[in-house]
Image (cartoon, rainbow, N blue to C red):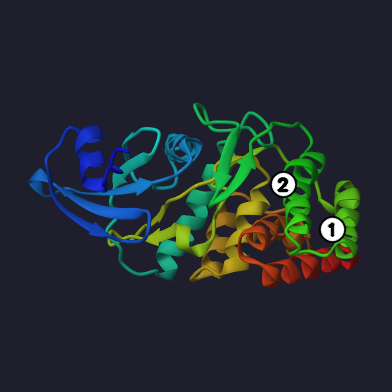
Amino acid sequence: MSAIEGPGAAVARITGRTVRSERRLSGAVCEVGLDGGRLVVAKRADEPGAVQAEAAGLRWLAGAGSVRVPNVLGNDGRWLVTDLVPQGRATARAAEEFGRELAALHAAGADGFGAPPPGGPVDAYIGLAPMRNQPGTDWPHWYAEHRVLPYLRAAVDRGTVRPAEAAVVERVCERLPELAGPAEPPARLHGDLWNGNVLWGADGHAWLIDPAAHGGHRETDLAMLDLFGCPHLGAVLDGYRQVAPLADGRRKRTGLHQLFPLLVHAVLFGRGYAEQALAAARAALVA
């Protein structure tokens, strides 16, 4: 059996540059220094589709010309190499600017709800969980079929959600056409927009990493920022509304959009997230 290729060797092969240093940032992510002092990030995935999806997602987000994302230097079936983003601190000014940029990203649109980025696979990932980018034309039905129900079934199969509890989420899915608010065109989503995927750069701007990009409803990205916390979230929303007003009742719909990430986390991380998902479903039915 051949040895597993290390990050330095992978970066040298993909970029054609001489590697001078390596520093592990997490289990699958390493900072690699190149000749000339350039720092890059090498990220390894066990599933080839995950690397392809992330690389395509970063390029698609960059193509909107709004949000800042690291430049993709190369990728293969196992490794993704991007520029490193030097980090600073979050400020209200940067957050408001980020809100405006996020609104412009969403407005760049997508070919349909669930549409993958150009060159991205249908079978993609959100974090460590498989995520199928199967396009649809109607957000409530697409969201129920391809985002909520697959993870609900997986959570039930794993015993994280009890079978009797699943009914409340299924009821939300049945009522989504009336609960979803005004119809909107497909937005270009980051798709996994929790605080850890928003880097506050040393340049004073926000940068986005680790997308699960697809066409979706713009309130889904905003709901995930709200769910897992974001510095200066009020300023982000203020900036967003300067560019793209939000439909009335958005706050009441936040739980609907949080069902998807909460159920993904229930599948990956257990019962605590399942209880949050069930609470969000119950709240949505009485909103």
Residue at the (61%, 59%) spot, across then down: 268
2 or 179: nearer the viewer: 2
Q: Position of 213 compared to 6: left or right?
A: right
Residue 42 place in picture, x, y as percent: 30, 47
273 or 268: nearer the viewer: 268
**Residue 250 seen in the current view:** no
Q: Which mark is residue 169?
A: 1
Image-quadrant location for residue 163: bottom right
Give the mark nearer the N terminus: 1 vs 2: 2
Describe the element under mark 2 as helix, strand or loop.
helix
Residue marked by disc 2: 147
Residue at the (54%, 60%) spot, across then down: 194
**Residue 228 seen in the current view:** yes
Q: Please rate how many residues cluster around mark 1, counting C-alpha atoms within 10 Å: few if below 14, some from 14 to 19, many from 20.
A: many
Q: How many marks?
A: 2
- The CA distance from mark 1 to mark 2 is 12 Å
Q: In this view, does 58 lie above or below 208?
A: above
Residue at the farthest front position:
1
Q: Is residue 23 above or below residue 275?
A: above
Residue at the (54%, 51%) spot, across then down: 128
Describe the element under mark 1 as helix, strand or loop.
helix
Residue 171 place in picture, x, y as percent: 91, 56
Image-quadrant location for residue 112: top right
